[in-house]
Image (spheres, rainbow, N blue to C red):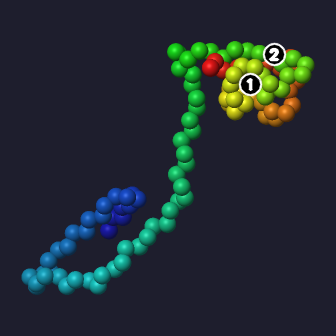
Amino acid sequence: MKLAHLIVGAALAVAVAACSSGTQPTQSPSVAPTEIPSLGPSPSPTVVATPSPSAPAATQYKIKKGDTLYSIARRNHISLDVLLAANPQIKNPNTLKIGQVIYIPAK
């Protein structure tokens, strides 16, 4: 007897042969389908933002004494969230270094 692999979601067809006496085979008792355990949620695809060729480039800005991300965002008429999204290299938004370069996205 050759064994085959089953694929989750594939339909399984079972052929029923007539008995040698010429009578119809008896029906086997109903069997409830067995639920196949899930392997967990499928992972979400990773999306990487790529600027489109028509999108204006971000402007580089060098941090000066007294700058905060909030003040830079206000000065450039963008939200703090937009400024942070344009600068994923900033791990702690409360710690900026004078001379550090950040990117200010175009409006």
- Where does the C terminus fall, quadrant-wise? top right
For image coordinates 49% across by 66% down, the residue present is 37
Q: Residue furthest left?
A: 22
Q: Position of residue 52 (x, y in %)?
A: 53, 20
The image shows residue 104 at horizontal and vertical percentages of 70, 20
* Total numbered circles: 2
Q: What's the distance in space between the residues labelled 1 and 2, CA to CA?
A: 13 Å
Q: Is residue 105 left or right of residue 12?
A: right
Which label belongs to residue 39?
A: none
Q: Please determine whether, in this image, residue 25 is positioned above or below residue 70.
A: below
- The residue pinned by badge 1 equals 73
Of labels 1 and 2, earlier in sequence is 2
Question: In the picture shown, does residue 7 fall above or below 28?
Answer: above
Instruction: Indicate the quadrant where residue 67 lies.
Output: top right
Would residue 35 appear left or right of 24 to someone viewing this image? right
Q: Amino acid at mark 2?
A: Lys
Disc on res. 62: 2
> Which quadrant would the N terminus be assigned to in this image?
bottom left
SS category of the residue bearing label 2: strand
